[in-house]
Protein backbone atom coordinates (compact mmCIF):
# COMPACT_ATOMS: atom_id res chain seq x y z
CA UNK A 1 0.00 0.00 0.00
CA UNK A 2 2.26 2.80 -1.06
CA UNK A 3 0.62 6.15 -0.39
CA UNK A 4 0.47 8.35 -3.46
CA UNK A 5 0.75 12.08 -3.39
CA UNK A 6 -2.43 14.07 -3.87
CA UNK A 7 -0.26 16.85 -5.36
CA UNK A 8 0.80 16.32 -8.96
CA UNK A 9 3.44 18.20 -10.90
CA UNK A 10 6.42 20.25 -9.71
CA UNK A 11 6.62 21.31 -6.06
CA UNK A 12 7.37 24.81 -4.87
CA UNK A 13 11.03 25.79 -4.79
CA UNK A 14 10.45 27.25 -1.34
CA UNK A 15 10.14 23.76 0.17
CA UNK A 16 13.02 21.98 1.88
CA UNK A 17 14.27 19.31 -0.59
CA UNK A 18 13.33 16.47 1.84
CA UNK A 19 9.80 17.86 2.05
CA UNK A 20 9.48 18.36 -1.70
CA UNK A 21 10.23 14.66 -2.15
CA UNK A 22 7.59 13.49 0.36
CA UNK A 23 4.79 11.31 -0.91
CA UNK A 24 1.55 12.59 0.64
CA UNK A 25 -1.10 10.45 2.30
CA UNK A 26 -4.15 9.85 0.08
CA UNK A 27 -7.31 9.80 2.15
CA UNK A 28 -10.48 8.16 0.83
CA UNK A 29 -12.86 10.31 -1.18
CA UNK A 30 -15.27 12.58 0.73
CA UNK A 31 -17.89 13.55 -1.86
CA UNK A 32 -19.76 16.75 -1.04
CA UNK A 33 -22.94 15.91 -2.96
CA UNK A 34 -25.59 13.77 -1.24
CA UNK A 35 -26.87 10.32 -2.22
CA UNK A 36 -23.73 8.22 -1.91
CA UNK A 37 -23.49 4.89 -0.11
CA UNK A 38 -20.20 5.70 1.55
CA UNK A 39 -18.30 2.58 2.51
CA UNK A 40 -14.75 3.82 1.84
CA UNK A 41 -13.41 5.48 5.01
CA UNK A 42 -14.63 3.31 7.90
CA UNK A 43 -16.98 5.87 9.36
CA UNK A 44 -19.88 4.78 11.55
CA UNK A 45 -23.21 4.66 9.67
CA UNK A 46 -25.12 5.68 12.84
CA UNK A 47 -25.17 9.19 14.32
CA UNK A 48 -23.42 10.11 17.58
CA UNK A 49 -25.37 10.02 20.86
CA UNK A 50 -28.06 12.72 21.13
CA UNK A 51 -26.21 13.83 24.28
CA UNK A 52 -23.32 14.94 22.05
CA UNK A 53 -25.58 17.34 20.17
CA UNK A 54 -26.95 18.77 23.44
CA UNK A 55 -23.42 19.24 24.77
CA UNK A 56 -22.32 21.01 21.58
CA UNK A 57 -25.22 23.44 21.84
CA UNK A 58 -24.29 24.21 25.44
CA UNK A 59 -20.68 25.08 24.51
CA UNK A 60 -21.77 28.01 22.31
CA UNK A 61 -21.13 31.00 24.59
CA UNK A 62 -17.78 29.57 25.77
CA UNK A 63 -16.35 29.49 22.26
CA UNK A 64 -14.81 32.93 22.83
CA UNK A 65 -12.39 31.19 25.25
CA UNK A 66 -9.47 28.93 24.38
CA UNK A 67 -9.91 25.30 25.38
CA UNK A 68 -7.97 23.62 28.19
CA UNK A 69 -4.40 22.93 26.93
CA UNK A 70 -4.65 19.26 27.99
CA UNK A 71 -8.26 18.91 26.84
CA UNK A 72 -9.67 18.62 30.36
CA UNK A 73 -12.16 17.39 31.38
CA UNK A 74 -11.98 15.00 28.44
CA UNK A 75 -8.51 13.73 29.30
CA UNK A 76 -9.66 12.73 32.80
CA UNK A 77 -12.73 10.96 31.39
CA UNK A 78 -10.68 9.02 28.85
CA UNK A 79 -8.18 8.09 31.58
CA UNK A 80 -11.02 6.82 33.80
CA UNK A 81 -12.48 4.89 30.84
CA UNK A 82 -9.10 3.21 30.35
CA UNK A 83 -8.47 2.75 34.08
CA UNK A 84 -5.36 4.97 34.04
CA UNK A 85 -4.21 8.16 35.76
CA UNK A 86 -4.64 11.33 33.62
CA UNK A 87 -0.85 11.86 33.43
CA UNK A 88 -0.69 8.75 31.26
CA UNK A 89 -3.04 10.15 28.61
CA UNK A 90 -2.67 12.74 25.85
CA UNK A 91 -5.70 13.83 23.83
CA UNK A 92 -5.26 14.79 20.20
CA UNK A 93 -6.96 16.23 17.16
CA UNK A 94 -7.78 12.69 16.01
CA UNK A 95 -5.41 9.78 16.60
CA UNK A 96 -3.64 10.81 13.39
CA UNK A 97 -2.24 13.86 15.19
CA UNK A 98 -1.01 11.67 18.03
CA UNK A 99 0.62 9.24 15.59
CA UNK A 100 2.44 12.16 14.06
CA UNK A 101 3.56 13.47 17.47
CA UNK A 102 4.69 9.99 18.48
CA UNK A 103 6.73 9.49 15.32
CA UNK A 104 8.30 12.95 15.55
CA UNK A 105 9.05 12.41 19.22
CA UNK A 106 10.65 8.99 19.03
CA UNK A 107 12.10 8.40 15.57
CA UNK A 108 14.95 10.34 14.04
CA UNK A 109 17.95 9.84 11.82
CA UNK A 110 19.47 7.65 14.57
CA UNK A 111 16.87 4.92 14.49
CA UNK A 112 14.15 3.37 12.47
CA UNK A 113 10.51 2.52 12.45
CA UNK A 114 9.03 -0.94 11.81
CA UNK A 115 5.61 -1.89 10.47
CA UNK A 116 4.02 -5.11 9.27
CA UNK A 117 2.40 -4.68 5.85
CA UNK A 118 -0.04 -4.03 4.37
CA UNK A 119 -1.31 -1.65 7.02
CA UNK A 120 -2.57 1.89 7.58
CA UNK A 121 -0.86 3.86 4.81
CA UNK A 122 -0.31 6.94 6.97
CA UNK A 123 2.51 5.12 8.81
CA UNK A 124 4.64 5.12 5.68
CA UNK A 125 3.98 8.80 5.11
CA UNK A 126 4.95 9.63 8.70
CA UNK A 127 8.13 7.58 8.40
CA UNK A 128 9.05 9.42 5.19
CA UNK A 129 8.54 12.76 6.93
CA UNK A 130 11.24 11.93 9.50
CA UNK A 131 13.70 10.54 6.99
CA UNK A 132 13.97 7.48 9.24
CA UNK A 133 14.69 3.98 8.00
CA UNK A 134 11.44 2.03 7.59
CA UNK A 135 11.49 -1.77 8.04
CA UNK A 136 8.49 -3.41 6.44
CA UNK A 137 7.72 -7.11 6.87
CA UNK A 138 4.63 -8.64 5.26
CA UNK A 139 1.96 -10.22 7.45
CA UNK A 140 1.80 -14.01 6.96
CA UNK A 141 -0.78 -15.39 4.51
CA UNK A 142 -3.23 -15.84 7.43
CA UNK A 143 -2.53 -12.25 8.59
CA UNK A 144 -0.66 -13.38 11.70
CA UNK A 145 2.54 -11.59 12.68
CA UNK A 146 5.56 -13.61 11.52
CA UNK A 147 8.57 -14.09 13.80
CA UNK A 148 10.65 -12.37 11.13
CA UNK A 149 8.86 -9.18 12.09
CA UNK A 150 10.21 -9.30 15.65
CA UNK A 151 13.72 -9.71 14.27
CA UNK A 152 13.33 -6.82 11.81
CA UNK A 153 11.80 -4.64 14.54
CA UNK A 154 14.28 -5.53 17.28
CA UNK A 155 16.42 -2.42 16.78
CA UNK A 156 13.72 0.00 15.66
CA UNK A 157 12.95 2.93 17.92
CA UNK A 158 9.23 2.60 17.17
CA UNK A 159 6.96 -0.23 16.04
CA UNK A 160 3.51 0.71 14.74
CA UNK A 161 0.87 -2.01 14.85
CA UNK A 162 -2.71 -1.28 13.82
CA UNK A 163 -4.74 -3.80 15.80
CA UNK A 164 -7.31 -4.58 14.41
CA UNK A 165 -5.28 -3.98 11.28
CA UNK A 166 -6.46 -1.96 8.32
CA UNK A 167 -7.21 -3.04 5.60
CA UNK A 168 -7.45 -6.69 6.74
CA UNK A 169 -9.61 -6.18 9.85
CA UNK A 170 -7.63 -8.98 11.50
CA UNK A 171 -6.28 -8.98 15.05
CA UNK A 172 -2.92 -9.97 16.50
CA UNK A 173 -3.74 -11.44 19.95
CA UNK A 174 -2.49 -9.54 23.02
CA UNK A 175 -0.25 -12.52 23.93
CA UNK A 176 1.55 -12.20 20.59
CA UNK A 177 1.89 -8.42 20.97
CA UNK A 178 3.46 -9.04 24.38
CA UNK A 179 6.02 -11.40 22.83
CA UNK A 180 6.84 -8.69 20.29
CA UNK A 181 7.12 -5.96 22.95
CA UNK A 182 9.51 -8.13 24.98
CA UNK A 183 11.62 -8.88 21.90
CA UNK A 184 12.26 -5.29 20.83
CA UNK A 185 14.31 -2.45 22.28
CA UNK A 186 12.01 0.35 21.19
CA UNK A 187 8.46 1.40 21.78
CA UNK A 188 5.50 -0.65 20.51
CA UNK A 189 2.51 1.54 19.65
CA UNK A 190 -0.70 -0.45 19.29
CA UNK A 191 -3.15 1.59 17.23
CA UNK A 192 -6.56 0.51 18.52
CA UNK A 193 -8.73 2.77 16.37
CA UNK A 194 -11.11 -0.16 15.79
CA UNK A 195 -10.83 -1.98 19.13
CA UNK A 196 -14.46 -1.41 20.18
CA UNK A 197 -15.52 -3.73 17.36
CA UNK A 198 -13.07 -6.44 18.47
CA UNK A 199 -13.37 -9.20 21.05
CA UNK A 200 -10.56 -7.72 23.14
CA UNK A 201 -7.61 -5.37 22.91
CA UNK A 202 -4.19 -4.80 24.42
CA UNK A 203 -5.10 -2.47 27.31
CA UNK A 204 -3.77 -5.03 29.84
CA UNK A 205 -0.26 -4.69 28.36
CA UNK A 206 0.02 -1.11 29.66
CA UNK A 207 0.05 -2.50 33.21
CA UNK A 208 3.08 -4.72 32.75
CA UNK A 209 5.19 -3.43 29.89
CA UNK A 210 7.05 -0.09 30.01
CA UNK A 211 7.44 0.08 26.23
CA UNK A 212 3.81 -0.18 25.12
CA UNK A 213 1.62 2.71 24.02
CA UNK A 214 -2.03 2.55 22.95
CA UNK A 215 -3.80 4.84 20.52
CA UNK A 216 -7.57 5.18 20.59
CA UNK A 217 -9.96 7.04 18.30
CA UNK A 218 -13.45 8.51 18.74
CA UNK A 219 -13.91 8.47 14.96
CA UNK A 220 -15.20 4.95 14.54
CA UNK A 221 -17.18 3.41 17.43
CA UNK A 222 -18.30 6.80 18.86
CA UNK A 223 -19.39 8.13 15.42
CA UNK A 224 -17.28 11.28 15.84
CA UNK A 225 -14.92 11.26 12.84
CA UNK A 226 -15.88 14.86 12.11
CA UNK A 227 -15.04 16.04 15.64
CA UNK A 228 -11.42 14.79 15.45
CA UNK A 229 -10.71 13.21 18.84
CA UNK A 230 -8.02 10.65 19.61
CA UNK A 231 -6.09 9.55 22.68
CA UNK A 232 -2.62 8.23 23.36
CA UNK A 233 -2.01 6.24 26.55
CA UNK A 234 1.41 5.20 27.77
CA UNK A 235 4.02 5.71 30.49
CA UNK A 236 3.65 9.11 32.21
CA UNK A 237 7.24 10.19 31.42
CA UNK A 238 6.74 9.48 27.73
CA UNK A 239 3.43 11.38 27.64
CA UNK A 240 5.05 14.34 29.44
CA UNK A 241 8.00 14.24 27.04
CA UNK A 242 5.77 14.32 23.97
CA UNK A 243 3.68 17.23 25.26
CA UNK A 244 5.94 20.03 23.89
CA UNK A 245 5.35 18.66 20.38
CA UNK A 246 1.62 19.29 20.38
CA UNK A 247 -0.09 22.57 19.54
CA UNK A 248 -0.97 24.52 22.70
CA UNK A 249 -4.71 24.11 22.16
CA UNK A 250 -4.87 21.06 19.93
CA UNK A 251 -8.37 19.91 20.89
CA UNK A 252 -11.22 22.40 20.48
CA UNK A 253 -13.88 23.17 23.08
CA UNK A 254 -16.41 21.58 20.72
CA UNK A 255 -14.40 18.36 20.52
CA UNK A 256 -13.87 18.27 24.30
CA UNK A 257 -17.61 18.66 24.92
CA UNK A 258 -18.46 16.06 22.27
CA UNK A 259 -15.99 13.54 23.67
CA UNK A 260 -17.17 13.95 27.28
CA UNK A 261 -20.82 13.54 26.26
CA UNK A 262 -19.99 10.47 24.15
CA UNK A 263 -18.26 8.83 27.12
CA UNK A 264 -21.31 9.61 29.29
CA UNK A 265 -23.42 7.51 26.92
CA UNK A 266 -21.33 4.38 26.48
CA UNK A 267 -24.51 2.33 26.03
CA UNK A 268 -25.16 4.22 22.77
CA UNK A 269 -21.69 3.41 21.45
CA UNK A 270 -21.93 -0.25 22.51
CA UNK A 271 -25.36 -0.72 20.93
CA UNK A 272 -24.11 0.66 17.62
CA UNK A 273 -20.93 -1.44 17.80
CA UNK A 274 -23.12 -4.53 18.36
CA UNK A 275 -25.27 -3.68 15.33
CA UNK A 276 -22.16 -3.14 13.22
CA UNK A 277 -20.69 -6.46 14.33
CA UNK A 278 -23.92 -8.26 13.39
CA UNK A 279 -24.01 -6.56 9.96
CA UNK A 280 -20.29 -7.33 9.51
CA UNK A 281 -20.97 -11.05 9.82
CA UNK A 282 -23.84 -10.81 7.31
CA UNK A 283 -21.66 -8.78 4.91
CA UNK A 284 -18.77 -11.25 5.24
CA UNK A 285 -21.08 -14.23 4.58
CA UNK A 286 -22.64 -12.45 1.58
CA UNK A 287 -19.23 -11.65 0.08
CA UNK A 288 -18.02 -15.22 0.59
CA UNK A 289 -21.17 -16.49 -1.15
CA UNK A 290 -20.19 -14.28 -4.11
CA UNK A 291 -16.76 -15.94 -4.26
CA UNK A 292 -14.62 -13.45 -2.35
CA UNK A 293 -12.16 -14.54 0.29
CA UNK A 294 -12.82 -12.49 3.46
CA UNK A 295 -10.31 -12.66 6.34
CA UNK A 296 -12.09 -12.77 9.73
CA UNK A 297 -12.62 -9.11 10.59
CA UNK A 298 -12.84 -7.64 14.07
CA UNK A 299 -13.22 -4.09 12.79
CA UNK A 300 -16.03 -2.07 11.18
CA UNK A 301 -14.87 -3.03 7.70
CA UNK A 302 -13.95 -6.15 5.78
CA UNK A 303 -11.41 -6.98 3.09
CA UNK A 304 -13.00 -8.74 0.13
CA UNK A 305 -10.30 -10.51 -1.88
CA UNK A 306 -11.16 -11.59 -5.42
CA UNK A 307 -9.12 -13.31 -8.11
CA UNK A 308 -8.50 -10.42 -10.46
CA UNK A 309 -7.75 -6.71 -10.29
CA UNK A 310 -10.65 -5.26 -8.28
CA UNK A 311 -10.40 -1.76 -9.75
CA UNK A 312 -13.12 -2.46 -12.36
CA UNK A 313 -15.49 -3.52 -9.54
CA UNK A 314 -14.55 -0.36 -7.62
CA UNK A 315 -15.36 1.73 -10.70
CA UNK A 316 -18.62 -0.15 -11.44
CA UNK A 317 -19.78 0.40 -7.85
CA UNK A 318 -18.81 4.06 -8.05
CA UNK A 319 -20.94 4.43 -11.17
CA UNK A 320 -23.83 3.26 -8.96
CA UNK A 321 -22.85 5.83 -6.29
CA UNK A 322 -21.38 3.22 -3.94
CA UNK A 323 -17.90 4.10 -2.68
CA UNK A 324 -15.51 1.40 -1.41
CA UNK A 325 -11.70 1.48 -1.17
CA UNK A 326 -9.23 -0.03 -3.62
CA UNK A 327 -5.49 0.07 -2.96
CA UNK A 328 -3.14 -0.16 -5.88
CA UNK A 329 -0.46 -2.40 -4.35
CA UNK A 330 0.55 -5.97 -5.24
CA UNK A 331 -1.04 -7.73 -2.24
CA UNK A 332 -4.23 -5.68 -2.37
CA UNK A 333 -4.80 -5.19 -6.09
CA UNK A 334 -7.45 -7.93 -6.20
CA UNK A 335 -9.16 -6.69 -3.04
CA UNK A 336 -11.67 -4.09 -1.89
CA UNK A 337 -11.88 -2.72 1.63
CA UNK A 338 -15.54 -2.26 2.46
CA UNK A 339 -16.84 -0.37 5.50
CA UNK A 340 -19.74 -1.98 7.34
CA UNK A 341 -22.70 0.31 6.73
CA UNK A 342 -26.35 -0.07 7.70
CA UNK A 343 -28.19 -3.29 6.81
CA UNK A 344 -29.88 -1.48 3.90
CA UNK A 345 -26.55 -0.24 2.54
CA UNK A 346 -25.12 -3.74 2.87
CA UNK A 347 -28.06 -5.23 0.94
CA UNK A 348 -27.59 -2.63 -1.81
CA UNK A 349 -23.87 -3.32 -2.04
CA UNK A 350 -24.30 -7.11 -2.18
CA UNK A 351 -27.06 -6.83 -4.81
CA UNK A 352 -24.87 -4.55 -6.93
CA UNK A 353 -21.85 -6.86 -6.60
CA UNK A 354 -23.98 -9.81 -7.68
CA UNK A 355 -25.22 -7.87 -10.71
CA UNK A 356 -21.66 -6.79 -11.63
CA UNK A 357 -20.53 -10.43 -11.37
CA UNK A 358 -23.37 -11.58 -13.64
CA UNK A 359 -22.62 -9.03 -16.37
CA UNK A 360 -18.94 -10.03 -16.29
CA UNK A 361 -17.76 -6.75 -14.83
CA UNK A 362 -14.84 -8.34 -13.01
CA UNK A 363 -16.44 -10.48 -10.27
CA UNK A 364 -14.58 -12.46 -7.67
CA UNK A 365 -14.29 -15.69 -9.62
C1 LIG B 1 -5.57 2.17 11.81
C2 LIG B 1 -6.04 3.59 11.91
N1 LIG B 1 -5.50 4.39 12.83
C3 LIG B 1 -5.90 5.69 12.94
C4 LIG B 1 -6.85 6.21 12.11
C5 LIG B 1 -7.19 7.67 12.22
O1 LIG B 1 -8.14 7.91 13.18
P1 LIG B 1 -8.54 9.39 13.60
O2 LIG B 1 -9.79 9.72 12.89
O3 LIG B 1 -8.75 9.28 15.10
O4 LIG B 1 -7.42 10.32 13.26
C6 LIG B 1 -7.43 5.43 11.14
C7 LIG B 1 -8.44 6.02 10.24
O5 LIG B 1 -8.96 5.48 9.34
C8 LIG B 1 -7.01 4.08 11.02
O6 LIG B 1 -7.52 3.28 10.07
Image (cartoon, rainbow, N blue to C red):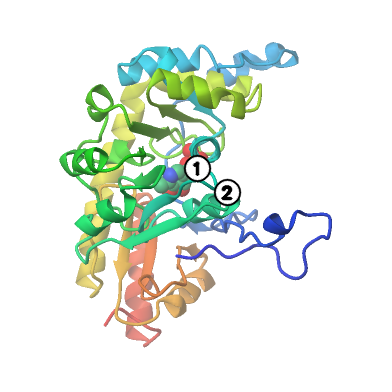
SS of the residue under disc 2: helix
In this rendered view, identify the residue nearer to me: 321 or 265.
265
Looking at the image, which residue is at 56% across and 55% down? 128
Relative side of 15 to 163, left or right: right
Looking at the image, which residue is at 53% across and 29% down? 92
Looking at the image, which residue is at 61% across and 23% down? 254
Looking at the image, which residue is at 40% across and 76% down? 310
Q: Is residue 122 above or below residue 365?
A: above
Circle 2/circle 1 CB separation < 8 Å: yes
**Dot placed on the residue nearer the N-terminal end, 2 or 1:** 1
Viewport quadrant of the C terminus: bottom left
Relative side of 33 to 174, left or right: right
Q: Position of residue 78 (x, y in %)?
A: 41, 19
Residue ID for mark 2: 130
In this rendered view, identify the residue nearer to me: 48 or 82.
82
Does residue 164 appear anywhere in the picture?
yes
Q: Position of residue 137 (x, y in %)?
A: 33, 61
Residue ID for mark 1: 107
The image shows a total of numbered marks equal to 2
Viewport quadrant of the N terminus: bottom left
Does residue 144 appear anywhere in the picture?
no
Relative side of 251 to 224, left or right: right
Q: Is residue 244 above or below residue 222?
A: above
SS of the residue under disc 1: loop
Q: CA distance from mark 2 to mark 1?
A: 7 Å
Amino acid sequence: MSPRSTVRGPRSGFLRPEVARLPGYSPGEQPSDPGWVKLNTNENPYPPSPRVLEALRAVGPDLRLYPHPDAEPLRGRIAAFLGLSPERVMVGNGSDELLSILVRGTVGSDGGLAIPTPTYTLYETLAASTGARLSQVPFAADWSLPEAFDRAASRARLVLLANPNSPSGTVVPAERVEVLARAVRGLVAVDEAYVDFAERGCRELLDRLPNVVLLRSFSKSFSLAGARIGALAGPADLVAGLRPLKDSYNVSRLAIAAGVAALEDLAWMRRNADRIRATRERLSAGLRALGFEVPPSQANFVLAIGRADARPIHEALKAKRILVRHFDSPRLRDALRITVGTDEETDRLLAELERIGRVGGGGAA
